[in-house]
Amino acid sequence: MLAPLSYGSPDMMTRNAARTLFHPFATAVLTPPAEGSRTLFLGAEAGFSLPEGFAGTLHAVQPFKPLYEAVSKLGIDTKPAAEGEDYDLALILLTRHRGANEIMIADAIRRTKPGATIVVAGSKEDGIQSMRKRMNALGLDPDHLAKYHAQAFWFVRPDAPEEVIAKLDQPEALVLGRFRTAPGMFSHGEVDGGSQFLARYLPKDFAGAAADFGAGWGYLSAELAAASPQLEAIDLYEADHASLEAARSNLASIVPDLNARYFWHDLARDPVKNRYDLIVMNPPFHIGHAADPNLGQALIRNAAQALKSGGVLLMVANRGLPYEPVLKELFRDSDEVARNARYKVLRGVR
């Protein structure tokens, strides 16, 4: 899954940052792109309107499925990963992951033409001020302005782009010597404690069809395959496209004979068509800064619909989250399998 602070609809500060990103063009501080130009928009989110005179083609990139859908509904060409090069302009909306932000800036430099302008916006919570200082330290000398409780800065693509790209690009992490991950993914540098706890209670003799809801970069799927070598098949559902692709690569390397399928899917909103004997999950539980049990409950409801009669949901959650009532409502039988100082493993039987 994606880092919990990024799940769900963007909060007000993020929407303000989307407006701030276009403010230099709306006020003619920057010249809007002309007809025939191509603009790359990394980290695209809805919540903005194009300023008057902003022409050319806008190519948006958003790997997180709910935000991707919102941008696509604006009629903008949107993809989950960046493609192409020689863009005339790049726009970047920061996230709350510094490493992922630096990767986006490096990618914008890589994919733009010499002399192109790169515009970056974000809120204080996104680290916009420290990122502007970082650009100054790299000799990019950005201009900036503040508006809508956020800030935008911009700079011209450097004459020696390779040097700057090398300083901004982030190396992959190698977790447990097997799983390759990248900044911006949920718990990208180590296995999340909840997932580790759940892995202890995965079945040892399961032989049916399984699903991993919020699969992240594939840890629980790999652990289930190791615990139950007779596993018939597993489907991985994940809202973050980059994490899903990492899971695909990781499982192909770790368990190459596993019968696995991969779905870029918003489990909080969209039902699952397939049916399973077992679903495992470590659901996200934050929107913005606040814990929101409704998010995990939505995934539990989706899981209940996706399980066959007699099928089992096995999930982990922070001890304080109130998931037991919804499990009791939707499942024929439910109980707590285990708990430690921080987490609990819950089970529901359809």
Image: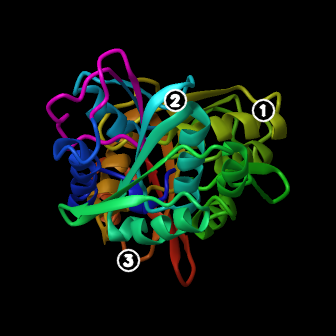
Circle nearer the N terminus (2, 3): 2
Q: Are marks 2 and 3 in contact (CB under 8 Å)?
A: no
Residue positioned 30% across, 23% down in the render: 34
Please tell me in which quadrant of the rendered image residue 153 appears. Answer: bottom left
Q: Helix, strand, or loop for circle 2?
A: strand
Q: Position of residue 102 (x, y in %)?
A: 57, 55
Q: Nearer the viewer, mark 2 or mark 3?
A: 2
Cα distance between the residues tagged 2 and 3: 30 Å
Instruction: Give, as a three-letter code, the residue at label 1.
Output: Ala
Tell me the tag on residue 263: 2
Identify residue for label 1.
252
Q: Position of residue 52 (x, y in %)?
A: 14, 31
Mark 1 or mark 3, earlier in chain:
1
Label 1: how many Cα within 10 Å (few below 14, some 14–19, many 20+): some
User: Spatial distance from mark 1 to mark 2, Cα to Cα?
Assistant: 15 Å
Mark 2 is surrounded, within 10 Å at the Cα level, by few (under 14), some (14 to 19) or many (20 or more) other residues, namely: some
The quarter of the image holding the C terminus is top left
Q: Which residue is mark 3?
A: 320
Residue drawn at x 55%, y 25% as measured from the top left: 86
Which range of residues does the magenta coloring cover?
32-57
Q: From the viewer's perspective, tell me whether residue 98 is left or right of residue 92.
A: right
Q: Nearer the viewer, residue 338 or 6?
A: 6
Q: Earlier in the sequence, mark 1 or mark 2?
A: 1
Please name which of the two marks, 1 or 3, marks the residue nearer to the observer: 1
